[in-house]
Image: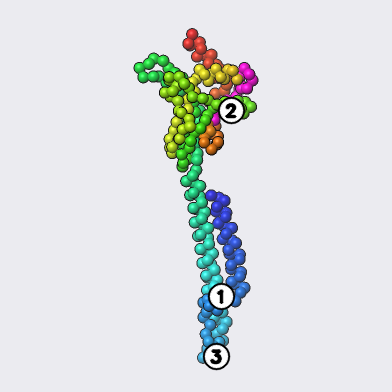
Amino acid sequence: MKKLVQLSLVILLSYSLFTLPAIASSDPPSTEFNFSPTASVDPAGTDTRGQYEQQNLFWNAFGAIGGTVGALATAGAVAVALWQTKFSQNKKLKVSFTDDIAVVPDGGNVVYRYVGVSVVNIGNRDVILSSWGFELSNGQRILIVPDTSRIGKAVSIVLPYKLSLEDAKTLMYAEPLFFTVVREYVASGDLKQDQKIRFYVIDSTGRKYTALTTKTVNEYLRIADKREKQDT
């Protein structure tokens, strides 16, 4: 929007610089605002040619000012139209990470734990989510594929998924599998224990949205050890 306003001011200044001096320095056209009488001397003997020339110059200058105002109004209308077009096509997602998702099937007594990424469409157009995952320390992307287990199919979002305006979805990853994968990449040196993990979501145009985990890798490893002791 700032660039559009600057463009409007440039148009206005250019019009003023090239229009007003030309009118002020040139003779007024005989067909515009021609107040010149057939005689240059009135009955009292006073020369009126200079008065009529001043009137012509005034009205032409007044018309130039009106043209300048019109040019400004046009430039402003163009700027507003361009801004509205850009705003109406604005694509924006709010992405956040969560590690405290618990799922209990209806009538069941087993708790399934998940980590996940919450995605909210806060823009002005639909967004198609195509893939998601997390990144290693060197920036390499690890793609998360759909969970084919019975409970996984029930809670998973099938990608690609069209996220409508003001719609929100959570992409979930089974916590035990997340802990296992984290351990493997720590052992291989691809994840550092003092770092937070960056999760990503990619849309159909290749644009990437990211969110960091709320804890470090080392903290998640301690939680994994605690979970294992509880299960034994």
Label 1 crowd (10 A; few <14 / some 14-19 / many >=20): some
The amino acid on which the numbered mark 3 sits, given as a three-letter code, is: Gly
Residue at 48%, 49% (x, y): give it.
84
**In front of the other: label 1 or label 2?**
2
C-alpha gap between disc 1 and disc 3: 24 Å
> Sequence order check: which comes first, mark 3 or mark 2?
3
- Residue 216, by quadrant, is top right
> Sequence order check: which comes first, mark 1 or mark 2?
1
Residue 38 in percent (x, y) is at 53, 87
Residue 207 in percent (x, y) is at 55, 36
For the record, the magenta segment spans 186-200
Residue at 60%, 76% (x, y): give it.
27
Q: Where 31 sits versus 92, above or below?
A: below
Q: Which residue is mark 2?
A: 141
- In reply to whether residue 156 is colored magenta, the answer given is no
Q: Where 224 sits versus 39, above or below?
A: above
- In reply to whether residue 195 is colored magenta, the answer given is yes
Residue 151 in percent (x, y) is at 43, 20
Q: Is disc 3 in contact with disc 2, using a CB cutoff of under 8 Å?
A: no
- As rendered, which of 28 and 127 lies closer to the eye? 127
Q: Which residue is mark 1?
A: 57
What label sits on residue 45 in the rendered view?
A: 3
**In front of the other: label 1 or label 3?**
1
- Residue 53, by quadrant, is bottom right
- What secondary structure is marked by label 3? loop
